[in-house]
Image (spheres, rainbow, N blue to C red):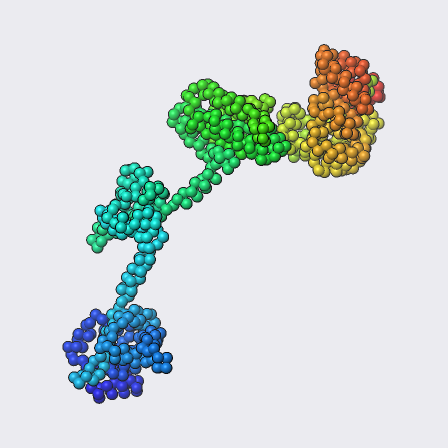
Amino acid sequence: MKSEQSAAEACCLENAPYDSSVRPPLLCDLQLSIFENAGRAIILTDPAGLITYFNRAAQQMLGYTPDEVVGRVTPLLFHLADEISACARSFTCDPDCEPPIGFGVFVARLKLQIRDEADWTYVRKDGSHLPVSLAVSVLRDAKGGVQGYLGIASDISERRRMEQDLRIAAIAFESQAAIMVTDVNQRILRVNQAFTKLTGYSAEEALGQTPGMLKSGRQDADFYAAMWRSLGQCGHWQGEIWNRRKNGEIFPEWLTISGVRDARGRVSHYVSTFSDISNLKVAESEIHHLAFYDPLTAMPNRRLLLNRLDQACVSSKRSGQFGALLIIDIDHFKTLNDTLGHDVGDHLLVEVAKRLVGCIREGDTAARQGGDEFVVMLEELGTDPSSASVQAEIVAEKIRVELARPYLLNGDTEYFRSASIGISLFFGQEKSIDILLKQADISLYKAKDAGRNAIRFFDNAMQTALDERAAMEAGLRRALVKDEFVLFVQPQVDAMRRLIGAEALLRWQPAGRAMVAPNDFIPLAEETGLIVPIGLWVLDQACAELRRWADNPSTKNLFLSVNVSARQFRQADFVAQVVDALARHGTNPKLLKLELTESLLLDNVEEVVAKMLALREFGVRFSLDDFGTGYASLSYLKRFPFEQLKIDRSFIRDICINPDDAAIVRAIIAMGNTLRLNVVAEGVEENSQHAYLVKHCCCLFQGYLFGRPMSFEDFQISLDSCPLPGLETADNWVI
């Protein structure tokens, strides 16, 4: 034995190759056969720790061949240095005592016990790590001397994985989610601490019971039948469910149930995990409310209204009954908001919402579209359209009367507000949602046009008018680009019927079509804001014509009046626009007269006066158009630098037969003369009207009696046909 050990040591020390055909020391044929076929890794060393044998299982486990390891100095070749060091330090508590190193660790451990077994980490040839359970035994001879050491190692990777899985499972079982384990008969076998905290039942109270102890009663038998079908088909189920705590409180939870199968594939257990989603439900409710309800009035908003309207159309088609859409707008709400403040305005809207809800049936919908506009949707009004219209009008009238009652918005002070209501009937899905809303909107505007505090139904004529309006607006936008606007003029004369000037009148002549009347397109231009660029075009053309008149002896002293809309006048750079137009054409500013309406005098008075004075300083003159039809007071009138008043044609028409009109005209003439303003009578068509006006000291006139509106070319031709154009008798001037 001693000679064999010496030979192995010598072989190692001289780094001679190991001859695997040589029988390892201490092994007989039977032992060698057993070791070679063993399922565990077996390593033999001599007393010095030199490897003398390395079986087939060890080769597969560690990736080395016997030639690579037999004869090496130590088996620590397969161990982590950190594990060896930690193990060595555990042998002594004396800091002055040097711990064993290398193979001495195993020797030291074996001195304490005959057989040493512990978990270690093997390092394979490729550098990977493998957890093993290593048992080391001392091999002794008959006299008790140490002949070598036997190491038997087994792979414990699977065991480590199972232990880790068990640790994870143990931690997971005590997670924040409630867990319940039942057998195949639904008897509760185990619950975790979160289950107790969530349900109020202790583990002792729950064990042996069924999950039915938590039922709230909110789910019916069909719900549970569907749950068990899913479990049977898919092996799991998850969803929202309501359960009951021990104290009787019902709460929503998110539940997941999974079936656990045994080795034969049969379900042996069920594992349920669930958590309280009360906070989530509250958040969902808040999000839903924010998304579908108006925050001020708590009424359904436009999004929810559209959803319900779509459903109502489907229901109407199925039932064959008509429904109605009512759009309600609070009259002059902006005035209240601007004068009393938004808080009072909000208070009014809340009160309106309450009254609306009280006027409709359960099942109908009242919603707030936005601002001061509300919508009411009525369903099941009957199968006859006439009857449905009557029913809708009854509800609308009830709403109108209710909203007209006084409101207590600020203490005990009463405020009155009316409402305009537009109604559109619907049946099935004949019309799209957009068309229904559009039609109701059209009828609402008709109610406003009728003087407000009114109810109007939609009809096809309304739609036609809307389409025509849209086409006209598009045409107006093209007209500027295509140069389809033209200026006409209508003469103004004095009491002796002598020509003193003219008024420029805008006309629209679309290509290939009849001329559009001013009353048809000018209000639309005002509404859309197109009046501003159109007005600038008129101003530029008028200045150009005045410059051409200056070169002709028959027209060089004539003034030209130009109508200016309030919207155009309020432009911040209006003064500069007028000055630029005059300068661009070299026009005499004293011959340009701007006609303003009374509506302009009601807002931003100081700004209006400042602009007028600036232009008046430049030489431009001003005339107040259609006097008597607006709201201008005498105190306002004297503040503005007007040179002229124009009496509206509506008073002139019946001046000879209506004493009231005659009295109004006489008063306006007297007032104008008192304020040193020239008074122009518009719409004079008869000699009797002219004679009456002259008799009462009116000095200037305009109307068909003296000339109809005409193009500038025709105007010049008429002047050229007179011996002394515009300066002689009226007979020479009549067109």
Q: Is residue 48 left or right of residue 685?
A: left
Q: How many marks?
A: 0
Q: Residue at 28% of width from left, 41% of height from top?
A: 224
Q: Is residue 104 above or below residue 584?
A: below
Can you say which quadrant of the picture contains the N terminus?
bottom left
For the question of whether residue 370 can be seen, the reply is: yes
Q: Is residue 420 left or right of residue 169?
A: right
User: Where residue 307 sits in the image (x, y, percent)?
Assistant: 44, 34
Residue most toward the left?
30
Q: Nearer the viewer, residue 669 or 514?
A: 669
Q: Nearer the viewer, residue 224 or 171?
A: 171
Q: Residue at 74% of width from left, 34% of height from top?
A: 606
Q: Quadrant of residue 51?
A: bottom left
Q: Residue at 20% of width from left, 72% of height from top?
A: 38
Q: Residue at 42% of width from left, 28% of height from top?
A: 363
Q: Nearer the viewer, residue 544 or 442?
A: 442
User: Where residue 483 sits in the image (x, y, percent)?
Assistant: 67, 32
For the question of whether residue 704 can be seen, the reply is: no
Q: Is residue 6 above or below residue 349?
A: below
User: Where residue 186 sits in the image (x, y, percent)?
Assistant: 24, 47
User: Where residue 250 sits in the image (x, y, percent)?
Assistant: 35, 41
Q: Is residue 546 above or below residue 727?
A: below
